[in-house]
Amino acid sequence: MALSLSARPLDPAALDTPLLVLPLAPGAALPPALGPLDAAVGGALGRVLERRDFRGGRDEVLHLAGVPRGPGRILLVGLGRATDRPDDAPARLRRAAALAGRRARELGAGTLTWFGGVASAADVERVGIGLGLGAWEYTDLKTPPAAEERRAPLTAATIHIEDAAAGARGVAAATAIGAGYDLARRLGMMPGNLCTPDLLVETAQDIGRRLGPRVTVLRRREMEGLGMGSFLAVAQGTPQDPALIQLEYRGGPADAKPIALVGKGLCFDSGGISIKPAGGMEFMKFDMCGAAGVLGAIEAVARLALPVNVVGAVGATTNMPSGTAVKPGDVVRAASGKSIEVINTDAEGRLVLADVLDYVRRHEPTAIVDAATLTGACVVALGHAATGVFGNDEALVGEVLAAGSRAGERGWPMPVWSDYQEAIKSDVADIKNTGGRSAGAITAAKFLQEFVGDTPWVHLDIAGTAYSETDLVAIPKGPTGVPVGMFVEFVRGRVR
């Protein structure tokens, strides 16, 4: 259920809300505007700050219940310390809001009011997105609990801001981007038997019907006609019909070159003949999070009605072992004409992306940004705190990194020096699909670079950031929605 947002000036002394959220930084005093409210709750707010029962640290919360009048409950949420990095501010505010949204959902508050820490439309946007991330849950396949045990979902939030016009702008942006996150996370959370290439096609077509992007779908037969042997090598082991899905959003001048967003859509990745270990294989339903990010970003961009042209492209299939599956040592030919020796069938995402990247080049895009849960090596290098960012254009890499910082989705630049090219040279083909364990995330990016030509390009390895196998405090384990925010901020940055 989408979170309904509003923003307007509020009188804290007259608030009547099931849950009032007060964000505070370390060492912050109670805002003077909250004096009447503090009096109404018997001075409880002032006392917890004076006694340092609440210190405003990151992820710190303090819950006050049973207040005599005014808000039903009060939730103090810590913003954490500001650092010397100016790009920390968006992440701090959004994270605190996500934690508040999650707690509100767990409490069954139904609605909440956010008071404090907001001074601009951008602040409202960050809080609104964060609240939505925290409030989101996937219950489609669960039996509802007994009526007496049910808690109300968080359905609405009001954000305090003195400037009502700025508040309206922030709400509109947060609602649009929040819808993109919701779509991406729902697709990611669905099991592989439900989130199939057919479902991704239907999702794209639904976006087209509702919001206007033109949708083109290539199936196995059309891809065979285009010589997409790299993509089809991955799909040859599954009876499910693969799909190359393209969405064209035209918000800019008709003759303006588009931005291209590309996503890996492996709806389930068993590893193929190079089969993965059984333990944890269920998480491979998340191997389509790059595709989900593209679909979520197009949803958000179209809702924002940005004056720019954007092409989104998704390569969707499953990677399964069978009598017809591609084998280690096989050589396949991509649509670009390059021959590829398949060393490891579990390095399949780059085989799919090779033909999708080549396909979007026909639009002559000003930039290509792809996202993929591509390598475990990137998780080893960066953990779960940052997306690996690779590219052939230093200015574009910087642009994408800045977009990620604004969105609260941090990235870290990785090299794609020519030194790494040697690792993917093949004895029997033009290149091979893996360069071994050393620098695995980099050699995977070098492989992709073979298919973008001289187009400015950035590759996002989101293997460590698109989903989590453990609880993340602000949001539960599962899909995070990355890279929806980074994609959207990159596109918005091009039209600011």
Image: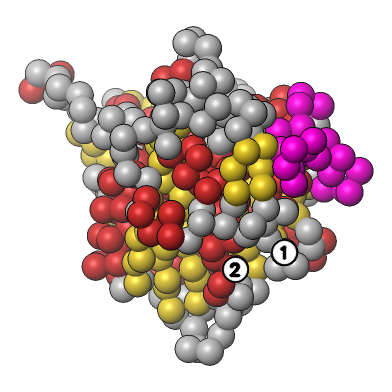
Q: Is residue 422 magenta?
A: yes
Mark 1 is on which residue type? Gly
Q: Mark 1 falls on what kind of element?
A: loop
Q: Is residue 488 left or right of residue 432?
A: left
* Residue 47 picture location, percent across and down: 52, 28
Mark 2 is on which residue type? Arg
Say which residue appears at 40% left-offset and 65% top-offset: 247
Residue sticking out furthest to the left: 147
Say which residue appears at 58% left-offset and 80% top-offset: 257
Q: Which quadrant would residue 358 be assigned to in this image?
A: bottom right
Return the disc, 2 or 1, that comes first in the chain's sequence.
2
Q: Residues within 10 Å of mark 2 (few under 14, many from 20)?
A: some
Residue 361 tag number: 2
- Residue denoted by label 1: 453
Q: Is residue 294 above or below residue 437?
A: below
* Residue 262 picture location, percent across and down: 53, 56
Total number of numbered labels? Answer: 2
Q: Residues within 10 Å of mark 1 (few under 14, many from 20)?
A: few
Q: Is residue 121 magenta?
A: no
Q: Which quadrant would residue 158 be assigned to in this image?
A: bottom left
* Magenta-highlighted residues: 416-438
Q: Is residue 430 left or right of residue 214?
A: right
Q: Is residue 197 visible?
A: yes
* Residue 289 picture location, percent across and down: 47, 41
* Residue 144 picture location, percent across and down: 14, 24
